[in-house]
Image (spheres, grey):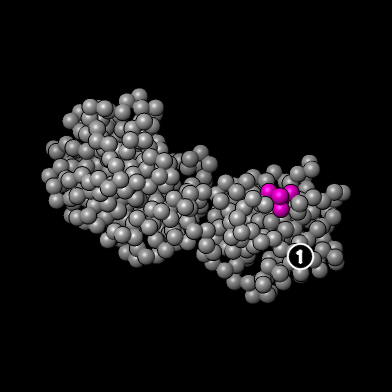
Amino acid sequence: MEITNDIRYVGVNDHKIDLFESQYAVPHGMAYNSYVIVDEKTAVMDTVDRRFTQEWLDNIEKVLGDRKPDYLIIQHMEPDHSANIKVFMDKYPEATIVSSAVAFNMMKNFYGDNYTDRRIISKEGETLSLGRHILHFVAAPMVHWPEVMITYDETDKVLFSADAFGKFGANDTPDDNWADEARRYYIGIVGKYGEQVQALLAKAGGLDIQIICSTHGPVLKENLGYYIGLTNTWSSYAVEDEGVVICYTSVYGHTREAALLLQKKLQEKGCPAVPIYDLARDDMHKAISEAFRYGRIILATTTYNMGIFPPMETFINNLKERSFQKRKVGIIENGTWAPKAKKIITDMLSDCKDITFCQNNVTLKSAMNAQSDAQLDALADEIMQ
Ligand code: FEO
């Protein structure tokens, strides 16, 4: 695939993967993107997952023909992009590898060699000339590992962005909603590092970018303000859409009944969106991304072994790991003899920044009754304010 006259796509699509990074469901597969810049010198941008070595090498050969690659530029050492460094360097003994100093330390640990006699250590602000193409290196620490160094081609105005602007899904599957799978990817994988992503966006703001080539997902060529704007929203923990997301667990269905009734009440009050997730059955990472999408969230769960029901505990810990903040939280607790979920949830979220807890929460002592129905009305009124 031609990106520009001189830049070609040589990545692969993965439809066999079950869980990305061994935890994220990817029903539409995954893409590991790699690119070749063809100039007086040739450069390969990143490698791909180790299960696709031969396909990737074949893709490079199809582009270069009899020519050999001069440079392998490694922007990020996570194995979905670095796994084929050794096979590449063995196959092309004349090639030079370009990466950050931190990446070369990781390379030795991962692959047993960091190529001290065949390498260029790239630093922030330095450039590499391929002939017509001048590549600028831009440090992007913690987007999403500390060694990340992204690359800007000033000639074709292409930003090779490593994991930034990536998404779940193979590139040969229908992609009619970039935002949903990009949000689930971003919040899941990079969500903790909003400050660092903001720093990268500030640097990118000084560049004339016409094309974004991420290591995952489609090449972005049009309407770049949309993608940059969403990434700015996510990394600043701002509210993306108006609505209330309800996340619940329920052992025998009574807490679920309350959650569904609250959803109905909110819809009747005109709330623009009230998505609801069963944390034991639905995709936990979709629910996590929705918690960051909307400004208001209801957490409904049971007291369990003097704690809270395990999927809810996991969910809240996932929010905290990703710097959950700037949200309004309402609670529905259930406990047949000693309800304490409300206190546990409040305590768990107490060290998150700018969390506003509703005053009108709901306590069920087993099942819904007139009193808890009235409490739901009060909670619905308050969360809608
Ligand atoms: Fe796609 Fe952080 O690796």
Q: Position of residue 148 (x, y in %)?
A: 37, 43
Residue 111 against residue 122 in the figure, above or below = above
Q: Relative to 20, is 32 on the left or the right?
A: left
Residue 176 colored in magenta in the image: no
Residue sticking out furthest to the right: 337
Horizontal and vertical percent for residue 251?
A: 75, 49
Quadrant containing the C terminus in the rendered view: bottom right
The residue that appears at 34% across and 50% down in the rendered structure is: 161
> In which quarter of the view is residue 366 placed?
bottom right
Q: Residue furthest toward the top?
A: 112
* Residue 41 visible to the viewer: yes
Could you classify mark 1 by the number of other residues whose Cα lies within 10 Å: few (under 14), some (14-19), or many (20 or more)? some
Q: Is residue 206 above or below residue 11?
A: below
Going by the numbered disc 1, the residue's amino acid type is: Asn
Q: What range of the chain is rendered magenta?
A: 344-348
| Residue occupying image coordinates x 27% and y 55% | 158
Q: Nearer the viewer, residue 339 or 261?
A: 339
Figure quadrant of residue 87: top left
Residue 281 against residue 72 in the figure, above or below: below
Side of 86 relative to 349 (left or right): left
Drawn side of residue 346 relative to residue 130, left or right: right
